[in-house]
Amino acid sequence: MAEQKTIRVTLTRSPIGTLKSHKETVRRLGLRRMHQTVEHQDTPTIRGMIAKVNHLVTVEEKSS
């Protein structure tokens, strides 16, 4: 079976004062609080969401 890559996304900066679309993107990534970390599959959709709010989050790649 192929190895699935996983991405850990952590909210490091507050979305207060950012565009509404950035706030919604952070929420759709599953991030609600500062320094909260969530894991997602490494897909082009998730990568695009991360690219949109890259100034608010940090990303760690890991293979599971």
Image (spheres, rainbow, N blue to C red):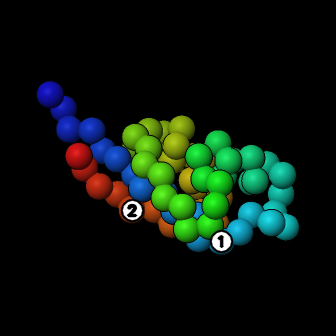
Q: Which corner quadrant holds the N terminus?
A: top left
- State how many labels appear: 2
Q: Position of residue 18 (x, y in %)?
A: 81, 63
Q: What label does residue 13 carry, if any?
A: 1
Amino acid of disc 2: Glu
Residue 27 vs 15, above or below: the answer is above
Q: Position of residue 50 (x, y in %)?
A: 57, 53
Can residue 57 be seen in this snapshot?
no
Amino acid of disc 1: Arg
Q: Position of residue 29 (x, y in %)?
A: 59, 46
Q: Which of 47/57 is in front?
A: 57
Q: Residue at x 40, y 40 (%)?
A: 41
Secondary structure beneath dot 2 equals: strand
Q: Which residue is mark 2?
A: 60
Q: What label does residue 56 carry, if any?
A: none
Residue 50 vs 56, above or below: the answer is above
Q: Toward which corner of the image does residue 22 lie, by quadrant? A: bottom right
Residue 34 vs 62, above or below: the answer is below
Q: Residue furthest top?
A: 1
Q: Residue at x 51, y 47 (%)?
A: 47
**Label 1 neighbourhood size at 10 Å, few (<14), some (14-19), many (20+)?**
some
Can residue 31 be seen in this snapshot?
yes
Query: Could you tell which of marks 2 and 1 lies nearer the N-terminus?
Result: 1
Q: Residue furthest left?
A: 1
Q: Residue at x 74, y 47 (%)?
A: 24
Secondary structure beneath dot 1 equals: loop
Lateral position of residue 34 relative to residue 3, left or right: right
